[in-house]
Image (cartoon, rainbow, N blue to C red):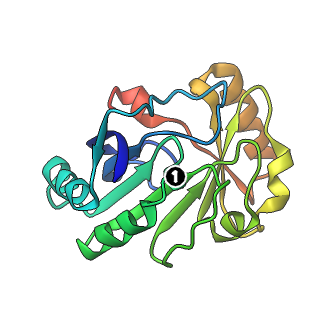
Amino acid sequence: MLQLAEIFYSIQGEGTWTGTPAVFVRLAGCNLACDFCDTDYSLKQIAGIDEVVAMVSAAGGDCPTVILTGGEPFAQAETGALIAALRRDGRRVHVESNGTIYEPLPDDVWLCVSPKERIDPRMAERANEVKLIVDERVPEEHLAAFTDKTPILLQPEGNKPANVRIALEYAKAHPRRFRLSLQTHKFIGVQ
C-alpha cells in the first residue's frame, strides 16, 4: 500500500521538462525536514498500486508523463513497484528525489535529484538533472557529488527576487554547467 498526499494533472513547472503536461503523484512523507519546504506532503489517502495507476488514468487520461514526487518518493518501500506498474501502463515516469535513499531505476526513468543534506553517491551518479535550491546562496557543497555532464538547475527558493538574482548571476558566471529554473507553475497560477 502507498501513502498518498495527492494526485493531480497539470504541467511540469520546473527543470528540463518545464511546460510538459504531466500527472503528479505526490507520495506522503519525507525523510528530511527542510525549513524552506513549500509542499504539503501529509498523508491524505492510502491506496494499492493498481488503484494509483487507475487514479493516474482518471486524472490525466492518456497523458504519457507521470511525475512521482513528495516529500521523498523513495521513503516508501513500494515506490519501485509503482514505477514498474506505471511503465507497464505505457507511462513515462519521472521521479523527483532528494537523493538520500538509493533505488535502482530503469534507464528510461527520468531522475531529478534535489540534494538538501546528504546524497547517496549512487543516486548522484544516476541523476538526469540536479535541482539546487538557492536560498541566499548556491549550495556549492553538493556540486562535487555530480559529474560535469549532469545539468544543474538553480532554483531560487520561493521565486524571491534576491534568490533569483543570486541564481541568475551564478548561472551567468558558470554558463557551461548551470541553468536558471524558476517555478513557472507559480507564475501562471496552476498547481
Q: Which residue occupies 50% across, 35% down?
A: 183
**What is the x, y in percent for residue 98?**
62, 49
- In which quadrant of the rendered image does the C terminus lie? top left
**What is the x, y in percent for residue 118?**
77, 49
**What is the x, y in percent for residue 58?**
13, 50
Give left or right: position of 124 versus 57. Answer: right
52 shown above or below 159? below
Residue at mark 1: 96
In the rendered image, the residue lying farthest to the top is: 161
Camera sees residue 20 = yes
Q: Which residue occupies 65% across, 38% down?
A: 32
Q: Count the marks.
A: 1
**What is the x, y in percent for residue 93?**
39, 64
In the rendered image, the residue lying farthest to the bottom is: 107
Quarter of image, res 135: top right
Viewer-closest of 46 and 143: 46
Quarter of image, res 158: top right
- In which quadrant of the rendered image does the N terminus lie? bottom left
Camera sees residue 16 = no
Task: Give the residue type that dot 1 points to.
Answer: Glu
Q: Residues within 10 Å of mark 1 (few under 14, many from 20)?
A: many
105 shown above or below 155? below
Viewer-closest of 18 and 42: 42
- SS under mark 1: strand
Quarter of image, res 35: top right
Viewer-closest of 96 and 173: 96
Q: Which residue occupies 58% across, 29% down?
A: 37
